[in-house]
Every structure is written in structure tokens, then in C-alpha cells.
Amino acid sequence: MRDLREDHDKTQQEIAELLGTSQTMYARYERGANELPLRHLIRLCDYYGVSADYFLGRTDT
């Protein structure tokens, strides 16, 4: 998550706003302290233009 966010020059706050959550909660998702809800996974995949498998590290493409 962090790599994709940084590759797109976005802050945690910007992505948190996209997801409709707080920066603190988004930081917890990035650290793995909280599970990312499916609705956020879908939103992030659409935003970054990647598959869920790519986002989850299950494929290189």
C-alpha cells in the first residue's frame, strides 16, 4: 500500500480522504494493524489502476 501511495506522490491524508476515513485509520491499514475493508481495497485498486491480486502482492503484473 505504502509503495503504491508513494509512487503516486500521495500523502496518507489524501488517500484517507479518498476512502472516507481518517489518516490515523489509513496509517493503521498501511502498517497492518487493522484489516483493510473490501470496499477500500476495491476503491484503491480502481484508483491506482491495478488488480486486487497485484495490490495484495499475489502477482507481479
Image: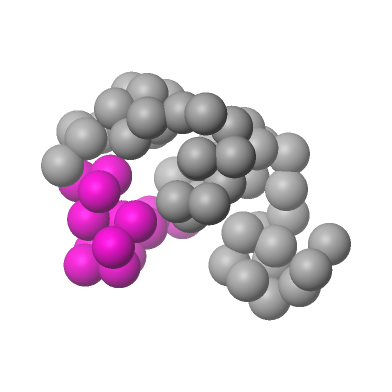
Position of residue 35 measured from the top left corner of the image (x, y, whole percent): 31, 65
Relative depth, front residue between 9 and 33: 9
Q: Quadrant of residue 31?
A: bottom left
Residue 44 horizontal side relative to residue 58, left or right: left
Q: Is residue 59 left or right of residue 55?
A: right
| Image coords of residue 28 (percent x, y) | 22, 55
Q: Name the residue: 63% across, 71% down.
A: 57
Colour mode of the rendering: one colour
Hey, which residue is sitting farthest right in the picture? Answer: 61
Name the residue furthest left: 24
Image: 54 above or below 8: below
Is residue 8 highlighted in magenta?
no
What segment carries the magenta color?
25-38
Q: Is residue 41 visible?
A: yes
Screen quadrant of the C terminus:
bottom right
The structure residue drawn at horizontal position 52% and vertical position 29%, both measured from the top left corner, is 9
The residue shown at (73%, 39%) is 49
Asked whether residue 36 is drawn in magenta, I would say: yes
* Residue 42 visible in image: no
Residue at 69% across, 66% down: 53
As drawn, 51 above or below 33: above
Q: Nearer the viewer, residue 43 or 29?
A: 29
Is residue 22 found left or right of 6 in the rendered image? left
Tell me which corner region of the image, top left, top right, bottom left or bottom right, holds residue 54: bottom right
x and y, in percent, of residue 51 in the image: 73, 54
Give the side of residue 3 with respect to residue 54, left or right.
left
Q: Please determine whether, in this image, residue 21 is positioned above or below residue 39.
A: above
How many numbered dots are placed on residues in this image? 0
